[in-house]
Image: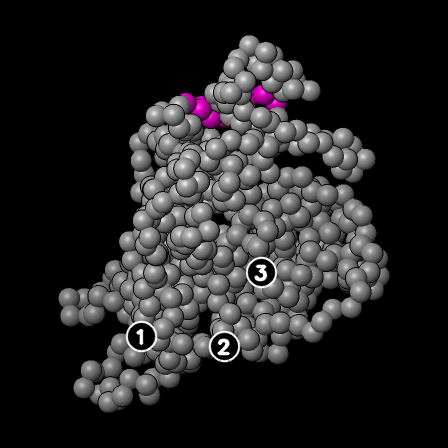
Amino acid sequence: RKLIEIYQKNRRTRNHRSTIVIEFKSRLVASQRTFTAPRVYKPAAGRNLKTNRTTFRNTEIKGKTDKMGKYKMKQFKWRSVKSRRRITMVPDSGSTDHLVNDLSVVQAISPYEKIVNFGGTERIAGKVVRLVPNSLNISTAIFSTSFRFNLLSLYKLTLMRLYTCFWSMKIIDDKGMERAPIYRTSNMYQVGVYYDSEKQEVAAISQTSKMLQHQRNMHFFDTTCRIKNCHACQQNKGQKPSHNRRPQEKGITAKRFNEVVHIDIVGPISLRSFNNHRYRCNLVDGYTGWGESYPLKSKTEPYLALRQWAQSHGRPQAVRCDNGAEFQDLFAKECRRYNTTIRRSAPYEPEQNGLAERFNRTIVDAIRTVVADTDRRLWAAAARAVSFVRNRLARREKEAPYKMRFQRNAATNYFRRFGSLCYYKVHVRTKMEPKYRMGCFVGYGEQNSTYRVAHYSKDGALVVSECYAVKFDESKTIKNMNSIKNIDDLDPLDLPGEFTTLNFGNGE
């Protein structure tokens, strides 16, 4: 109603020829009358009024391919910029997507292309990208260096409830606050969009295999490398078609981290780990989805997992569990120690603790997949590494648990393939001893920027050390940990002729 009054007032005071006709629409949604953004009708910026078409350079973006014909995904490194940048964008009512031609405002590039039609005669291929945080909160756009202008789609702004007010020369939101200025240059309207350059931006620096990046991400789904033909995922993931869902219990929804923690135990696992673990206790936060998987030697030790969670992430306000005997005596005593409320699901109703059950299946599928190419007795270390990586990757329709908890994106450029061959630096040695020794990569350090490497000590015991100086050979994986036992103590002339006799698996 306020915008209509402003429109009528400006219409009486200004020339009718320069007045932009704005059509307002309203609709009934969920029994509430809501106002939708205005639809602006005006000549598209940058078009020839005689031919009513836009001319651009007819070029295409073609991705580089390797010898196998697979598309190579771009890798990025972070670089910091001191101040904010203002990018000029031309508002266009006929554009269905935002178009950008400046790489400095791009945060991540998707491997997928989208064809953009100009006037029905010219077609240009562009990349779907994620933009740097900006004043209009534009998240996605289409990028190509062949675009002549940066086009701002008024259709996309309408969906975001942003109003284009040409009489006041600014873009406002539904509360009347100015989001971006509008100015006119050479009879063309332009919008100044401010991009936050103080945060870390990305630039393409190298190319790597999408399959290797998928393996570094512990075979989790990632929007930057959509792998559909992973042999390990096809064998170890998936389920049969589900039946009709039962009605879920309407419990209290968590609104902050550590308000409700869902807990469940998995086991016994037939194959013991190197530390004789046979069970895993999974804990997942109800608000952010942050999950941890702790290996246990006995089924009666979930209270130890709760203690580790409290030491690392703080005291939970409430826990959600089932009515198993393992969650009765010692577990209840530990909850009283932290003043934590216990919410138990009904007997034989695992759906009421569905968040923990779904997390169990996610972790089990990931562990089974990552240990397929390495020693299966490393499943306890894989559980810790899998949960570490999962907390830092965005899900299909939600943000990453790390970002929801700390309000910033987590770095993922240091991820490496689990179980791969690595060489860690030896600090205490003699002059003639080697500087690096052979080991197996089994995870990441949570307190420091280190890697967790499994190796054999001089007395023959298998230990896991956190090392900073590590060299990786991700093309090989350790199929059997006994193959690296005392391998550094042998004379190089006594080693077998073929390196494959040390039970290393192939990369892919």
Residue at horizontal 52%, vertical 61%?
Answer: 221
Residue at horizontal 29%, vertical 79%?
Answer: 487
> With 362 as the anchor, is 430 left or right in this view?
left
Q: Label 1, on which residue?
A: 67
Figure check: 122 above or below 371: above
- Disc 3, SS: strand
Q: Position of residue 153 (x, y in %)?
A: 50, 39
Circle 1 crowding by C-alpha within 10 Å: few under 14, some 14–19, many from 20: few
- Disc 2, SS: helix
Which amino acid is tagged 2? His
Q: For the residues marked 3 and 1, what is the alpha-carbon distance in whole angstroms?
A: 42 Å
> With 426 as the anchor, is 264 left or right in this view?
right
Q: Are marks 3 and 1 in contact (CB under 8 Å)?
A: no
Name the residue nearer the viewer: 289 or 461: 289
Q: Label 3, on which residue?
A: 294
Region in magenta: 175-183
- Disc 1, SS: loop
Figure check: 197 above or below 224: above
Circle 2 crowding by C-alpha within 10 Å: few under 14, some 14–19, many from 20: few
Q: Label 2, on which residue?
A: 231
Q: For the residues marked 2 and 3, what is the alpha-carbon distance in whole angstroms?
A: 28 Å
Q: For the residues marked 1 and 2, what is the alpha-carbon distance in whole angstroms?
A: 20 Å
Q: Residue furthest bottom?
A: 497
